[in-house]
Amino acid sequence: MLAACSPQGGAPAPDASQQQAQVQAAAAARNLDTYRQLLRIGNDGMAVSMGHDIVNHYPDSAAAKEVQQSLPAIEKRYTEASEKNRLAALWVYQVSPMAGGTQSTATIVSSQPSGNDRVQLVLRRHTSWGQSVFLYGSKPGFICHGNCTLTATVDGKPAHIKVFAPPTGEPALMMVDDKGFITMLHKAKKISLDVTFAEGEKKQTLVYEVGGFDPAKWVSLGKGKKK
């Protein structure tokens, strides 16, 4: 009768710690299968999350060892892609009617400052006015008498940008050398410009994360116009 009650083959039943280890090994294996599937469908974001979950919760498992071989590269790729997408999303591209013509614009808003002190950096092509680059804020605009020179920093290197206030009174500063600025923009990641607001003569550094600019999305308006 005692023999009939013994585990099959005489092997002792697993104790509580062994049962827990088996449960964890099974869970790690299931998560590993999910991790592999996420990699196959190219979902790097979810794969990174699942990979960290496996490594953190089952650090001594075979699943964790496998994940650790691929996770650093996947995470690096995901981080780079996420940053690229973030920078690209900072730009807005539009084609619309404007003052009896058509304009094509690429616009980015300053990352610093935020709130009401944000200033747009606008690249514009217009069927009548040609090409221009300008800062556009809120009234009363900026302090600039005639031509001014803004102290700038381009990817950590000092620069100077010549601008002028439009005679029509808009709260803007127009770049004197729009072509030169655009050429610089193509290669830049971050541009800082020191301006002085007319209201309270407040000095401010405007920071633009321009690395996501896509010139192909800034539509040309046809032949015979400034480009």
Image (cartoon, helix red, strand yellow):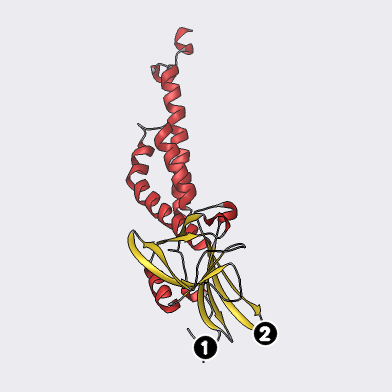
Amino acid on which disc 2 is placed: Gly
Question: Is residue 7 placed above or below 130 in the rendered structure?
Answer: above
> Which of 61 and 102 lies nearest the eye of the viewer?
102
Residue sitting nearer the eye, 37 or 114: 114
Residue 151 position (above or below residue 180): above
x and y percentages locating residue 218 in the rendered image? 52, 75
- Image coords of residue 163 (percent x, y): 46, 72
Residue at 55% from the left image edge and 57% from the top image edge = 118
Image point 43% across, 74% down: which residue?
182
- The residue wearing badge 1 is 225
Question: Residue placed at 44% from the left, 52% from the top?
Answer: 39
Tell which residue pokes out farthest to the front in this image.
145
Question: Label 2's element?
Answer: loop
Amino acid, disc 1: Lys
Q: Which percent across, then down, holds residue 50?
A: 46, 42
**As drawn, 131 above or below 208:** below
- The residue labelled by disc 2 is 100
Q: Are marks 1 and 2 in contact (CB under 8 Å)?
A: no
Residue 15 image-quadrant placement: top left
Residue 205, quarter of the rendered image: bottom left
Distance CA(mark 1)–CA(mark 2): 16 Å
Residue 109 is at least partly visible in this image: yes
Q: Give the residue drawn at x 48%, y 76%.
A: 216
How many numbered marks, from 0 up?
Answer: 2
Q: Nearer the viewer, residue 191 or 214?
A: 191
**Numbered circle sitting on residue 18:** none
Q: Is residue 27 shown left or right of residue 60?
A: right
